[in-house]
Amino acid sequence: MQVQLHNAAELEKAGLIPGGSLYYPTIFYPPIPMYGPGDEALILDGLDFDSARRTSVYIHIPFCRSKCLYCHWMVNVDCSEEVINDYLDCLEKEITLWKKKFGVEKIQPSSMLIGGGTPTALTPKQTAKLCRILHGGFDFSQCAQIICETEPGTILGDQGLEKLRILKDNGVDRVSLGVQALDDQSLKDMGRRHSARDVMQAMGQARKVDFKSVSIDLIYGYPGCTPEKWQTTLETAVVALDVDAFQLYRLRIVPHGDKAGKVKDRFEKEPGAFPTVDEIYIMKQLGFQVAEQGGLRETSRRFFSKGPVHDSQYLQDHTDRLADVIGFGASSWSNVQGRFYLNTGESLQAYAALIHQGILPINRGKVKTEDDQQRWALTLPLKHNGVSKKQFRETTRKTVNETFPRQIANLSKYGLVVEDESFLKLTDRGIFFADEVITQFYHHDYLPFPRSCYTEGELNPFSYHSK
Ligand SMILES: C[S@@+](CC[C@H](N)C(=O)[O-])C[C@H]1O[C@@H](n2cnc3c(N)ncnc32)[C@H](O)[C@@H]1O
Ligand code: SF4
């Protein structure tokens, strides 16, 4: 397939793209792992929770069948039924503690993501228990969508089908399968416990249960991944798996979660085993082209779908709509009315110990400054579907143009953003380099790499210091 690439060399020379293979995606602003310590009292005291605000809910289930080499999240492998049951009891208590803290009778999520880890690592009985806890803890009458993440090997056979049916009967309407690769060698190398054949069967199981939408996650940039292999993977996803949506993740080597994956060590020891940056750009571009041929469009960054019903409301809520997120479970993150915090991701024991003391299990976070709020209100919508100037004004009481004049002028000059009276958006070129464009708006304390990693050009993200 003929691939048309954007000119990356010009942007590296201007200081936009860090040298080498450095890559850091914006999942949230301020970036998730970069806070100092903080507990419930420090972060939440004084917050008068307004239940009328749009709020998404995230539920973290930190159990998996294996720890993948590239995974930086807090996960626990092959836990006993007792350990998982205790965790579910703690989760229930945490929801109750949270509501008590704010005197709220019910939380009405606008969307929910049950993620992990692997929520479907639970047994059918535990899945039913989780659903009971969720229905006891939340009012779903305003909830547009409930998404559940799965790992293919955990939804096979009769038990797998039973779990999926329980989830569907309890309102889950979209499932996302962590597929990552479609050749057995890569899957083995990643430390996954399922095969490519299992993926086909898992997809069949999800289709039997008739969810509104079934999507998959794939990773490019992994050792052994070539543009040719990646093209075959994408085509298999579109044709043989007939997915409703897929998320195409560029491999993240820099840890962004609570437990650094072994991929970082591997990269340091054996950088030549990984695809080059040029190959990564080809793979990224192939993603756009194969998706388009298969009738999928990129509706949020790295997320391609066949139409709005298949989009992730959870993703769109906390990016485009700037909705709050309340996270429950070990290592989950929350953004509640100007407070940002993380639950402890140290261990299941540390999480349970705080819950048993009647304390919310928060161990890091910050009360956001005006500067944080402005950058948050800009970066997330700009990365995805564009900044509504009205929404930015209502959120920050400032205009986009008076807040970030130099960044907007520079990025426009390089054809990375465009604006009109109502919106500031990424161009096609800006979309391709979205994560690098977004770091232009980071406060320098949060930039992921030191100044020496960027050329001293107009787009060096440190050059905005004196704003
Ligand atoms: C939190 S995981 C949950 C999925 C599920 N546990 C599974 O792996 O089957 C969500 C997705 O994040 C992506 N992901 C996790 N770590 C990554 C990394 N280091 N680089 C790129 N993508 C990653 C994977 O595609 C994964 O499916
Ligand atoms: S990628 Fe998924 S299955 Fe692998 S360790 Fe992370 S959460 Fe678990």
Image: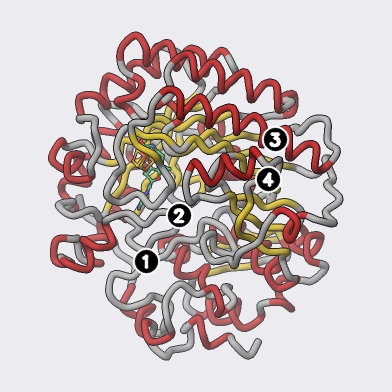
Return the residue at label 3.
Answer: 110
Percent position (x, y) of residue 424? 63, 65
Of badges 4 and 3, the one in the foreground is 4
- Lower position in the chain sequence, tag 3 or tag 2: 3
Compared across the picture, whether 261 is left or right of 352 comes to: left
Q: Quadrant where the C terminus lies? A: bottom right
Q: Residue at x 34, y 67 (%)?
A: 6
* Mark 2 Cα shell of 10 Å, populated few (<14), some (14-19), many (≥20): some
Percent position (x, y) of residue 330? 54, 43
* Image: 219 above or below 8: above
Of badges 3 and 2, the one in the foreground is 2
State the mark number for residue 360: 4
Amino acid type at mark 2: Asp
* Mark 1 Cα shell of 10 Å, populated few (<14), some (14-19), many (≥20): some
Amino acid type at mark 3: Ser
- Lower position in the chain sequence, tag 1 or tag 2: 1
Q: How many angstroms separate mark 3 from mark 2 (CA)?
A: 27 Å
The quadrant where ligand 2 appears is top left
Amino acid type at mark 4: Leu
In the structure shown, which secondary structural element does the residue marked by tag 4 occupy? loop
Q: Nearer the viewer, residue 23 or 122?
A: 122
Q: How many angstroms separate mark 4 from mark 3 (CA)?
A: 23 Å
Return the residue at label 1.
Answer: 23
Q: Nearer the viewer, residue 171 or 383?
A: 171
Return the residue at label 2.
Answer: 258
Q: How many angstroms separate mark 3 from mark 1 (CA)?
A: 32 Å
* Image: 416 above or below 43: below
